């Protein structure tokens, strides 16, 4: 396999360190009162790390993403990128929302390059960057297809290609597979890990799916109900590269149990993975 820089060219970027310190967010309500959505969130994603965030609906997961992406400002606390407090973050991280957002009037190749074009890259140059990657993303035969001609999984791959092509040091993925069936979802989880291992960006993922968090992440942050706080942090010490077969292991089941217990607010101990059974990412 060719080195990542050779395969991805300008889309390759060293991972950034993302850090939230004592993050708080309040929204004003119609009656003049304040609704606290986030209350003292601390979160770190190391360079090149895959971090997942899980929690009940309404706990503020998407608000964290909007703040990281620069779409919203925090009420209090700090957002640091590579150790520097960064008040103007818009465009620093690539952001993939829950829906693929493919424009129906643009073909696949032009949907993939729209972020580059908005950033000022000429269309011809943007296409030159995208064309070599279409095959790797399972879209080699569909460069000229319209979005309505793609399956759900193919649409998500096109959306992820658009995200990767931005060449940002961090990618924020907001439940990218939530609307897919179980088989397609599993296939795309495996595919995502393979691509992430090649690209090297820092990834922060929001998901409601506990097995998905265990399979993909190096570390999982569990959030409490609103106002959102970090209820638990679980390091996922499973060997990489991972395949879906690992979901059948006792260690995988033990991590699932820990995360489900944390989501239920349990504080009693749960079974830990047996020592010496998990490897480390090379």
Image: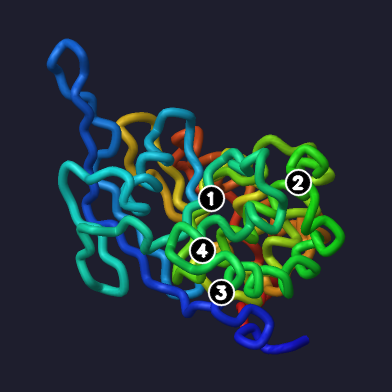
Secondary structure under the numbered disc 4 in the rendered image = helix
| Image side of residue 236 versus residue 154, left or right | left
Q: What is the crowding at mark 1: few (fewer than 14 residues within 10 Å), some, or many (at least 20)?
A: many
Location of the C terminus by quadrant is: bottom right
Q: CA distance from mark 4 to mark 3?
A: 10 Å
Q: CA distance from mark 1 to mark 4?
A: 14 Å
Spot the residue most to the top.
31
Quarter of the image where one finds residue 144: bottom right
Residue identifier under label 1: 96
Q: Tag 3 or tag 1, which sits nearer the N-term?
A: 3
Q: CA distance from mark 3 to mark 2?
A: 25 Å
Q: What is the crowding at mark 4: few (fewer than 14 residues within 10 Å), some, or many (at least 20)?
A: many
Q: Is residue 113 above or below residue 30?
A: below
Q: Tag 2 or tag 4, which sits nearer the N-term?
A: 4
Residue identifier under label 2: 185
On residue 116, which mark appears? Answer: 4
| Image side of residue 19 versus residue 34, left or right | right
The residue positioned 46% from the left and 75% from the top of the image is: 15
Mark 3 touches mark 2? (CB < 8 Å): no
Foreground: disc 1 or disc 3: 3
The residue positioned 60% from the left and 82% from the top of the image is: 9
| Residue 91 at x, y percent in the picture | 37, 59
């Amino acid at each position: 396999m060719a080195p990542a820089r050779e395969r991805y060219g300008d889309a390759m970027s060293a991972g950034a360190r993302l850090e939230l310190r004592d993050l708080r967010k309040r929204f004003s309500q119609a009656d003049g009162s304040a609704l606290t959505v986030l209350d003292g969130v601390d979160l770190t994603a190391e360079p090149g790390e895959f971090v997942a965030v899980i929690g009940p609906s309404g706990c503020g997961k998407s608000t964290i993403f909007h703040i990281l992406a620069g779409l919203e400002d925090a009420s209090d606390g700090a957002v640091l990128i590579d150790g520097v407090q960064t008040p103007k973050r818009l465009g620093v991280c690539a952001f993939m929302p829950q829906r693929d957002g493919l424009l129906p009037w643009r073909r696949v190749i032009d949907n993939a390059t729209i972020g580059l074009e908005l950033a000022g890259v000429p269309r011809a140059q943007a296409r030159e960057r995208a064309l070599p990657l279409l095959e790797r993303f399972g879209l080699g035969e569909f460069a000229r297809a319209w979005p309505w001609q793609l399956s759900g999984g193919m649409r998500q791959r096109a959306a992820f290609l658009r995200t990767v092509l931005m060449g940002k040091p961090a990618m924020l993925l907001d439940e990218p597979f939530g609307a897919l069936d179980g088989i397609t979802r599993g296939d795309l989880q495996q595919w995502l890990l393979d691509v992430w291992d090649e690209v090297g960006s820092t990834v922060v993922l929001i998901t409601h799916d506990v097995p998905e968090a265990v399979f993909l992440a190096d570390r999982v942050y569990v959030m409490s109900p609103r106002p959102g706080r970090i209820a638990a942090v679980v390091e996922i010490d499973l060997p990489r590269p991972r395949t879906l077969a690992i979901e059948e292991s006792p260690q995988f089941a033990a991590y699932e149990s820990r995360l489900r217990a944390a989501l239920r607010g349990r504080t009693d101990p749960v079974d830990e993975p047996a020592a010496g059974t998990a490897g480390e990412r090379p």
